[in-house]
Amino acid sequence: MSVADQDELALKREQLEQVKTEIEAKLETSRIEWTRAIREGYSSNREYTAFINSYEARCNRLRGLFAEKWQLERAFKAEPKS
């Protein structure tokens, strides 16, 4: 494996770790927000709608992160072992 291949592999590993960290943070944020929503509720339909819209946007980003994680993991499996 060349130095350039090793550098690329190291970069992919770093990207994968960053994606994993971001996924964990987003999942924890979602857990906290749902817990608060269950405990406190909403005083109006506007608050509820804002919460749901915000949550859907975060879920879309989370789906994107999972796709990115999957692609990075596949790239590792495709790498030739030395």
Image: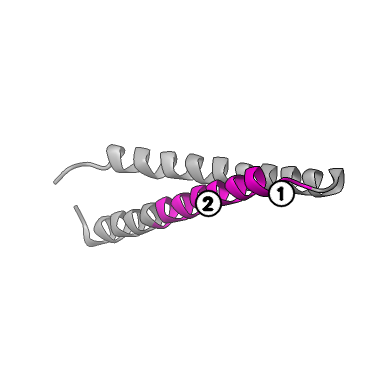
Q: Is 24 inside the magenta-drawn segment? A: yes
- Classify mark 1: helix, strand or loop: helix
Badge 1 or badge 2: first in the primary sequence: 2
At 23% from the left edge and 61% from the top edge, which residue is drawn? 3
At 48% from the left edge and 41% from the top edge, which residue is drawn? 66
Q: Write down the region rendered in magenta.
A: 18-42
Q: Which mark is residue 54?
A: 1
Across and down, in percent, residue 63 comes to: 56, 40
- Classify mark 2: helix, strand or loop: helix
The residue to which callout 2 is attached is: 26
Q: CA distance from mark 1 to mark 2?
A: 13 Å
At 73% from the left edge and 47% from the top edge, which residue is drawn? 51
Residue 78, quarter of the rendered image: top left
Across and down, in percent, residue 81 comes to: 17, 43
Kindly give the residue lying farthest to the left in the view shown.
82
- Asked if residue 47 lies left or right of residue 68, the reply is right
Badge 2: few (under 14), some or many (20 or more) residues near its Cα, within 10 Å? some
Badge 1: few (under 14), some or many (20 or more) residues near its Cα, within 10 Å? few
Give the amino acid type for the residue marked by disc 2 in the picture: Lys
Residue 69 seen: yes
